[in-house]
């Protein structure tokens, strides 16, 4: 028996034979164009075919992974027509006189690299969508690839990695588990695997090789372990664990529609963290009480120009309408420093996490922030909107923001626009300065939300993106909890509510401690909602 440790994205057990899936390798596509006009026509035709294919994939995935996750392919359809992608590819063909294949591959690699270099794990995983549409376009331009002959019976799919469109082509009665050498736990592929209810292991490394094709295997999604050729004792243990997991899952689904109330009768809000429309649908499917954090960065990245007010308005309106009157907290953009955009003149910094980012960027470039505020005020008529500002360190910053808010409202009034004039505003407590000045800040805003990821980073002077510092990263460090408790006390004394939206919010080891502090709201990934609600109801 061989045991390989990976990272699990869905807690379940499966037993079956491996099928090693090898994607056709698309090597360097550089080739000069003999006829630029012909190459442009080939490119445009490939875009149209890809769009139709994604339409079909989206329709099929509605049946297998639901509306929330089928929205992933709506995003990919938009990427096909994204000006950043199309203009780059067309310019390469017409000016650099290269083939459509070369233009697509070069553009796709560049855009994916841009997203990966942001340093934000959530945004980095979006590069996978760029690779997916790039691979689709190249496959079309090359005349289509050879079909893979999959086994007839249920199997565990092993591969180097999987693209989202590859993941949804499988049904649960055929593929009972995923075992991947690489991949990302925040990727769309991971999200789809969770939605399909299929145990999936990522980052198994080069120990998982093609030579293990057809070997009997077992995935323990609770421990993140792949067993190859397991012995009888291990198989019996996995079967017992599977029966217990199925029983617990039925109990969790029973929580949908029920109130989040502790044993003592205290009511608690459990909201969702989202970044895309697919996340919004997932929040609804998991019965979220609202959205506690909508990251708006994705609307700003990977484009040559800042999103227009209309672009922002349309997206925010869709989110608010789909949440059907539930609270939606939209955080203003957290770009700059390590999340560079070409339309803002910022330089790369030595310490990007401490640099010109988030609200500092908004105050330095007020027109950029006012565009977002105008879109938010206009969209506010379609739901229950809250606006939240990141990286606040002083009451003076909040006062500057109030001035910009008033200017944005006046500009809408002068244009004759209809908008929501009074929108509750809050701030993220993610700097020690904000926690220490919570009493003063609470007089200026309507709510707090503690971003435990950055609060931990800044309090412990620890780069949370560094793999070398894992042994020093203590998410439940006493200093972080003490700062959170200080902020909660000051919030309640001022009569405002306080939530927690960082990774610590989903860690049920700290749920009781947060409730003792007086935390009113938890905002977590959609897939963590039911588990957290179970914990709250058991206290």
Image (cartoon, rainbow, N blue to C red):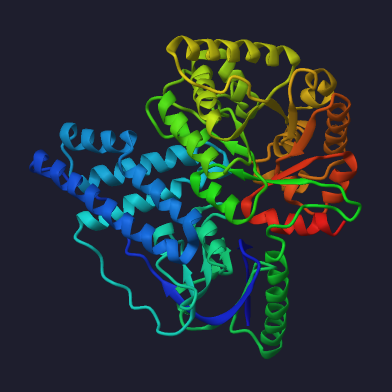
Left or right: where 205 falls relative to 311: right
Q: Give x and y (percent) for residue 345.
A: 46, 17
From where the camera sits, is residue 152 visible? yes
| Camera-nearest residue between 309 and 45 | 309
Residue drawn at point x = 65 percent, y = 11 percent: 400
Q: Nearer the viewer, residue 231 or 305?
A: 305
Q: On the rendered image, what quadrant is the C terminus found in? A: bottom right
Q: In the picture provided, is 1 more to the left or to the right than 99? A: right
Whether residue 137 is visible, yes or no, is no
Relative to 93, does residue 69 appear above or below in the rendering? below
The residue lying toward the viewer, choosing from 380 and 2, is 380
- The answer to whether residue 203 is left or right of residue 313 is right
Rendered residue at 88%/46% (across/down): 513
**Residue reaching furthest to the left:** 35
- Residue placed furthest toward the bottom: 232
- 479 up-or-down from 231: above or below: above
Question: What residue do we see at 39% from left, 31% from top?
Answer: 303
What count of labels does the image hold?
0
Q: Which image quadrant is residue 475 in?
A: top right
> Which quadrant holds the N terminus?
bottom right
Q: Nearer the viewer, residue 102 or 499?
A: 499
Q: Position of residue 112 (x, y in %)?
A: 41, 43
- Residue 142: give x, y in percent of width and height: 20, 57
């Amino acid at each position: 028996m061989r045991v390989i440790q990976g990272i699990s994205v869905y807690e379940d057990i499966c037993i079956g034979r491996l099928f090693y899936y090898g994607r056709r390798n698309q090597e360097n596509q550089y080739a000069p164009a003999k006829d630029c006009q012909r190459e442009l026509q080939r490119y445009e035709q490939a875009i149209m075919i890809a769009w139709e294919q994604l339409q079909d994939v989206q329709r099929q995935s509605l049946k297998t992974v639901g509306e929330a996750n089928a929205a992933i392919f709506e995003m990919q359809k938009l990427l096909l027509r994204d000006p950043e992608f199309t203009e780059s590819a067309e310019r390469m063909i017409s000016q650099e006189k290269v083939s459509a294949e070369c233009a697509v591959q070069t553009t796709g690699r560049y855009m994916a690299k841009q997203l990966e270099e942001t340093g934000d794990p959530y945004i980095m995983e979006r590069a996978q969508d760029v690779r997916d549409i790039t691979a689709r376009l190249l496959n079309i331009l090359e005349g289509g690839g050879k079909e893979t002959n999959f086994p007839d019976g249920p199997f565990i799919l092993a591969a180097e990695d999987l693209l989202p469109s590859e993941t949804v082509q499988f049904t649960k009665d055929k593929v009972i588990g995923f075992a991947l050498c690489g991949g990302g736990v925040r990727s769309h592929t991971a999200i789809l695997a969770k939605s399909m209810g299929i145990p999936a292991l990522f980052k198994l490394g080069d120990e998982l090789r093609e030579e293990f094709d057809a070997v009997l295997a077992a995935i323990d999604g609770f421990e993140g372990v792949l067993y190859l050729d397991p012995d009888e004792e291990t198989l019996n243990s996995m079967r017992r664990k599977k029966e217990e997991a199925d029983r617990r899952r039925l109990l969790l689904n029973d929580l949908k529609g029920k109130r989040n109330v502790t044993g003592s009768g205290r009511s608690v809000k459990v909201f969702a963290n989202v970044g895309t429309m697919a996340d919004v649908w997932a929040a609804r499917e998991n019965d979220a009480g609202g959205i506690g954090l909508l990251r708006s960065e994705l609307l700003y990245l990977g484009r040559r120009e800042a999103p227009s007010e209309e672009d922002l308005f349309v997206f925010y309106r869709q989110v608010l309408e789909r949440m059907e009157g539930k609270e939606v907290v939209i955080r203003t953009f957290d770009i700059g420093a390590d999340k560079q955009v070409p339309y803002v003149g910022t330089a790369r910094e030595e310490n990007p996490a401490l640099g010109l980012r988030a609200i500092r960027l908004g105050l330095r470039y007020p027109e950029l922030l006012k565009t977002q505020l105008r879109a938010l005020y206009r969209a506010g008529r379609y739901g229950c909107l809250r606006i939240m500002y990141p990286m606040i360190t002083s009451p003076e910053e909040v006062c500057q923001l109030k001035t910009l808010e008033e200017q944005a409202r006046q500009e809408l009034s002068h244009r004759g626009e209809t908008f929501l004039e009074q929108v509750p505003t809050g701030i993220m407590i993610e700097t020690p300065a904000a926690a220490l000045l919570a009493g003063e800040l609470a007089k200026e805003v309507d709510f707090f939300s503690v971003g435990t990821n950055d609060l931990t980073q800044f309090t412990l002077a620890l780069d949370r993106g560094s793999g070398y510092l894992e042994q020093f990263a203590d998410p439940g460090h006493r200093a972080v909890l003490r700062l959170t408790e200080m902020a909660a006390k000051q919030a309640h004394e001022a009569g405002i509510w306080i939530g927690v939206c960082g990774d610590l919010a989903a860690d049920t080891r700290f749920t009781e401690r947060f409730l003792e502090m007086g935390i009113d709201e938890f905002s977590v990934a959609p897939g963590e909602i039911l588990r957290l609600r179970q914990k709250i109801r058991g206290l």
